[in-house]
Amino acid sequence: MDQDTLETHVAELPQGRVHYRETGSGETLLFIHGLLVHGGLWGKVLPALSERFRCVLPDLPLGAHAEAMNRDADLTPPGLARIIADFMASLNLRDVTIVANDTGGALTQIVLANHPERIRRVVLTNCDAYKNFLPKPLWPVQALGWIPGATWLTVQSLRLRPARWLFLWLVCREPTDDRVRRSFLAPSRNGGVRRDLNKVLRGIDSKHTLAAAKSFGDFEQPVLLAWGNRCWFFGKHYAERMAADFPNARIEPIPGSGTFVPMDRPDELARAIITFCGE
């Protein structure tokens, strides 16, 4: 299912306007993406899941969002977790199953620590955790947030198809449509969106994920760790550590997948989610 075919809605939050799309009906699945992508990351899992669930896909202010947030918006990891919590409240979402990937998984962990009230279950695919926020190979990307004009130059370079291909090759093991690559990168040509991205990059620090991890033992709701085994940034040992730290967690291996599990193995991920929500 192409997210572009879904109607775009807007949630008015204290921090600014968050665009989102939704499809299906039933129990709510809230999909949380990571840096430099938007809710379209989950497009391939929607056909199977929207038959059973209400699927809600916000475009969070992580660099591929269509509209800049308020200038004073808190875009540190705890601030982004507050945006997710406020988004759930604005739509009156309850008994939510969060499905998260990459940076979105780290933000979800902070939501569990600080705003767990509306959450019924959690599905974490390959994501930042503990001291691995951001992974060391991505530290140069984070440094861009401190260099004036650096994100603008990066966006300009990514207008070249080979650069776009390399961008997703690092996180996907399967070929992706170049139109999808362009959709991820296009919003960051907007100055306000780049301002938001710089704030996000400057705020990332493993102290936030380490603090969230201290409360894993208090979260007793079910947690599924749907983990790709061909990920360069988030190895299986992170899933194993989280499975041990959460009281009610298990690992579901996703063979052949890199970091972007919903793009690499959408059918396997959808089946895992359906089974997990039926337990």
Image (tube, rainbow, N blue to C red):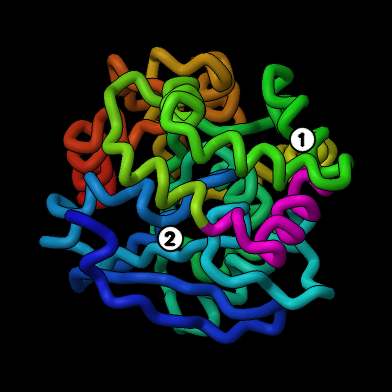
At 46% across and 83% down in the image, what residue appears?
92
Q: Is residue 63 above or below residue 10?
A: above
Q: Residues within 10 Å of mark 1 (few under 14, many from 20)?
A: some
Q: Is residue 120 above or below residue 215?
A: below
Give residue 30's quadrant in the image: bottom left
Q: Position of residue 111 (x, y in %)?
A: 63, 57
Give residue 254's quadrant in the image: top left
The reply to whether the magenta stretch includes residue 218 is: no
The reply to whether the magenta stretch includes residue 197 is: yes
The N terminus lies in which quarter of the figure?
bottom left
Disc 1 is placed on an element classified as helix
Q: Is residue 175 left or right of residue 156?
A: left
Q: Is residue 227 above or below residue 63?
A: above
Disc 2 is placed on an element classified as strand
Q: Is residue 218 left or right of residue 65?
A: right
At 58% across and 66% down in the image, what residue appears?
84
Q: What type is the residue that disc 2 sits on?
A: Arg
Disc on the earlier residue, 1 or 2: 2
Q: CA distance from mark 1 to mark 2?
A: 32 Å
Q: Taking the image as drawn, is residue 81 in sight?
A: no
Mark 1, residue position: 142
At 80% across and 74% down in the image, what residue appears?
71
Q: Position of residue 190 (x, y in %)?
A: 63, 62
Q: What type is the residue that disc 1 sits on?
A: Gln
Q: Residues within 10 Å of mark 2 (few under 14, many from 20)?
A: some
Callout count: 2
Q: Position of residue 113 (x, y in %)?
A: 69, 53
> Which residues fall within the magenta stretch?
187-204
Q: Position of residue 93 (x, y in %)?
A: 43, 76
Mark 2, residue position: 120
Magenta segment, principal secondary structure? helix
